[in-house]
Image (tube, rainbow, N blue to C red):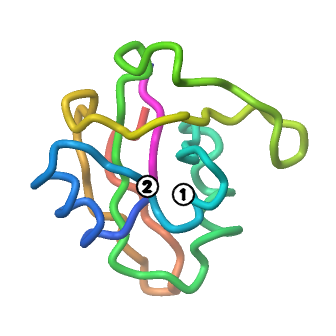
Amino acid sequence: MLIFKICHAGEWRAAMRTGVYDGSAKDRADGFLHFSTAKQLMGTLAKHYAGESDLLLVAADEGLLGAALKYEPSRNGDLFPHLYGPLPVSAVKWAREIRRDAGGGFVLPLDPA
């Protein structure tokens, strides 16, 4: 199954150079990388990225993340995937731009599941 990380394009370019994504400043402060399931994506974007641009949706294969991946209660008691360690680029299936529609709403890349 795929899980999703929202990040800024510049952060992802740095990860591609080093082979690992160490997370955003928020991730590092919290001690884990915040991920979302496909169903949780729009809520995550609205809550945490409303005024942001230059965003990518990074799809990772949860089966390649091992014991460092844990599902924990968060917003509204939903279980969210949290990665306690860096994200290896080798576990990523794809990274695609998150666009905005004419009204400013987020448009997810095709096939987010």
Crowd band around label 1 with a 10 angstrom C-alpha radius: few (<14), some (14–19), many (20+)? some
Residue type for callout 2:
Gly
Pointers 1 and 2 in contact (C-beta within 8 Å): yes
Residue type for callout 1:
Arg
Q: Nearer the viewer, mark 1 or mark 2?
A: 1
Q: Quadrant of the N terminus?
A: top left
Which residues fall within the magenta stretch? 2-6
Check if residue 4 falls in the magenta segment: yes
Residue 58 vertical placement versus 81 (above, below): below
Which element type, helix, strand or loop, lies under badge 1? Answer: helix
Choose between 5 and 88: the one closer to the eye: 88
Residue 29 position, x and y percent, is: 62, 61
Query: In whole angstroms, how far apart are the C-alphas of marks 1 and 2?
Result: 6 Å
- Please tell me which residue is depicted at 45% across the width and 14% down the height of the picture: 66
The kind of secondary structure the magenta stretch mainly shows is strand
Q: Quadrant of residue 54?
A: bottom left
Query: What residue does disc 2 label?
Result: 23
Check if residue 9 falls in the magenta segment: no
- Please tell me which residue is depicted at 42% across the width and 78% down the height of the picture: 101
For residue 70, which numbered disc appears in the image? none
Residue 102 position, x and y percent, is: 43, 86
Query: What residue does disc 1 label?
Result: 28
